[in-house]
């Protein structure tokens, strides 16, 4: 989880949408993520299978809804990995003084750094889950330790003047932020496009929600978890709790150290320390960012492979692509295809064009997961549930509505791109999956492809 969301989006949203109120944005997004995580925890402990929300939807709402959410999750993780790869490349360039043409956003045509890290980590993820876990654990230790350092050291540089006004007064959006670039809520109610104010903080919450879109990756490894009924809820909720506290604290330090109007969007935390003469701290921050973003890319690539594996196992895409390697125990074919796809996205599409789509994809998935909890309880009351969402069905309904509300605070442009992606998914489903899925093969008298499992 801890990656581009806190190391990059903090600066972008503070400077352009929320000011110091980005702290509130992270808090709002964290509460919504917690509601969704509770629903994920119940389903993950009840149905510990690869595919996460896709598998839950298949078990509760049927194949069509499952396809929608699976296609949506592929978008989320693919673009998420691409966004993080570009952030990784930018911080690496900041750390070693590399040319922004190849390792940054400004003036970049092909981001070589982003392509390279995706391909390298794609190989790590394919070779084995144990190796991936060891690499990830080491990187997580580094980035969490330095995030704590950022908070402790940064408190000495926080100035009250930089936090006032905490929520800047709303002001008209610049020319480029109107039309299809304004939030859906403003477009629906005929409001003039604006930034900052409470509306700006809510819009920023919808965008920085991207920072929380890693916890559900834990649920994708249900078949590779030794004690899923115990460990999946702990992993989901524990990850989210630690990350939320760090996000709020780090964002407060950033906007307290440097005036939000002067924040550097590319590397906000490192530049904040540089602005107060603490260059040595900026170097540590860049190291943490590189380590943190590396682990996020790796987890996203692994999660994508497991989602594709689950979809192919059900026949909605060609089952042959989901073959598990006899020695590595991973779905190597589909993982390789997706790794190449992510590398191309990371190399050629700018960060700003990708981040919003990740948020809307995650929020859409969370809506369906929240709805799935009461449905599965009604349909399968006998199912063993080691963790239960409290106050169901009220809390799952609140979770679904909260996620939907954040979706409506994303831009019209983001919604258009999202709907185009879903339309493409519908073409693939009705052109192939509907006729070739496991149930269709049984009805035609053809035996289904024997299911495989990824190995622990």
Image (cartoon, grey):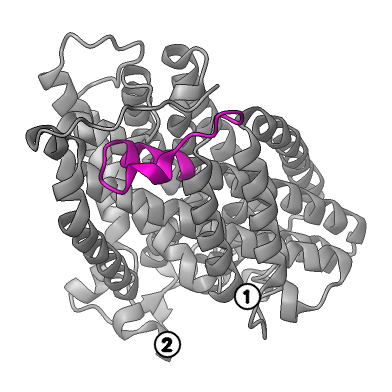
Residue range in magenta is 305-329
Judging by the rendered image, the residue that carries numbered circle 1 is: 261
- Element type where label 1 sits in the image: helix
- The number of numbered badges drawn on the structure is 2
Task: Identify the residue at horizontal 47%, vertical 47% (top origin).
Answer: 334
Judging by the rendered image, the residue that carries numbered circle 2 is: 176
Q: Is residue 114 above or below residue 337?
A: below
Direction front: furthest residue = 446
Q: Is residue 330 above or below residue 100?
A: above
- Could you say which is closer to the camera, residue 127 or residue 130? 127
Q: Is residue 91 above or below residue 417?
A: above
Direction left: furthest residue = 443
Task: Identify the residue at horizontal 41%, vertical 91% (top origin).
Answer: 175
Q: Is residue 256 above or below residue 105?
A: above
Residue 49 position in % (x across, y down): 37, 26
Q: Is residue 31 left or right of residue 153?
A: left
Task: Identify the residue at horizontal 41%, vertical 35% (top origin).
Answer: 34
Residue 385 position in % (x across, y down): 30, 12
> For the N terminus, which image quadrant?
top right
Q: Is residue 146 visible?
A: yes
Residue 327 located within the stretch drawn in magenta: yes
Q: Is residue 61 left or right of residue 449?
A: left
Q: Earlier in the sequence, mark 2 or mark 1?
A: 2
Residue 131 position in % (x across, y down): 69, 32
Q: Is residue 289 left or right of residue 330?
A: right
Residue 66 located within the stretch drawn in magenta: no
Which quadrant of the figure has residue 451?
A: top left
- Could you say which is closer to the camera, residue 344 or residue 241? 344
């Amino acid at each position: 989880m801890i990656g581009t969301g806190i190391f990059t989006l903090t600066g972008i949203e503070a400077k352009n949408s929320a000011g110091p109120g980005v702290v509130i944005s992270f808090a709002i997004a964290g509460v919504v993520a917690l509601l969704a995580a509770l629903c994920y925890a119940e389903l993950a402990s009840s149905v510990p299978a690869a595919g996460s929300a896709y598998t839950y939807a298949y078990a509760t709402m049927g194949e069509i809804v499952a396809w929608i959410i699976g296609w949506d999750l592929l978008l989320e993780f693919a673009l998420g990995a691409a966004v993080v790869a570009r952030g990784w490349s930018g911080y690496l360039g900041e750390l070693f003084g590399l040319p922004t043409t190849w390792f940054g956003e400004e003036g970049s045509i092909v981001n070589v750094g982003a392509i390279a890290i995706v391909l390298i980590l794609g190989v790590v993820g394919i070779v084995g889950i144990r190796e991936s876990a060891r690499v990830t654990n080491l990187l997580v230790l580094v980035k969490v330790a330095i995030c704590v350092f950022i908070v402790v050291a940064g408190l000495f540089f926080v100035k009250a003047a930089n936090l006032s006004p905490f929520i800047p007064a709303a002001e008209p959006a610049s020319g480029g932020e109107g039309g299809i670039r304004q939030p859906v809520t403003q477009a629906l109610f005929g409001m003039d496009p604006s930034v900052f104010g409470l509306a700006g903080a809510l819009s920023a919450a919808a965008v920085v929600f991207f920072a929380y879109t890693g916890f559900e990756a834990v649920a994708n490894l249900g078949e590779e978890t030794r004690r899923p009924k115990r460990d999946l809820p702990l992993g989901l909720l524990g990850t989210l709790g630690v990350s939320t506290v760090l996000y709020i604290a780090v964002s407060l330090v950033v906007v307290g150290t440097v005036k939000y109007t002067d924040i550097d969007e590319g590397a906000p935390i490192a530049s904040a320390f540089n602005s107060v003469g603490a260059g040595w701290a900026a170097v540590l921050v860049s190291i943490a960012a590189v380590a943190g973003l590396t682990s996020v890319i790796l987890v996203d690539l692994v999660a994508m492979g497991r989602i594709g594996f689950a979809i192919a196992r059900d026949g909605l895409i060609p089952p042959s692509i989901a073959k598990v390697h006899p020695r590595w125990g991973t779905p190597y074919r589909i993982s390789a295809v997706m790794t190449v796809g992510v590398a191309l996205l990371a190399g050629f599409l700018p960060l700003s064009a990708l981040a919003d789509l990740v948020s809307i994809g995650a929020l859409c998935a969370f809506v369906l997961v929240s709805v799935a909890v009461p449905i599965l309880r009604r349909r399968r009351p006998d199912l063993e549930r080691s963790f239960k969402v409290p106050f169901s069905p009220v809390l799952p309904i609140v979770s679904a509505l909260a996620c939907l509300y954040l979706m409506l605070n994303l831009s019209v442009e983001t919604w258009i791109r999202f709907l185009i992606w879903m339309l493409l998914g519908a073409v693939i489903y009705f052109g192939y999956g509907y006729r070739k899925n496991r149930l269709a093969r049984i009805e035609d008298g053809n035996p289904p492809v024997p299911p495989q499992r990824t190995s622990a």
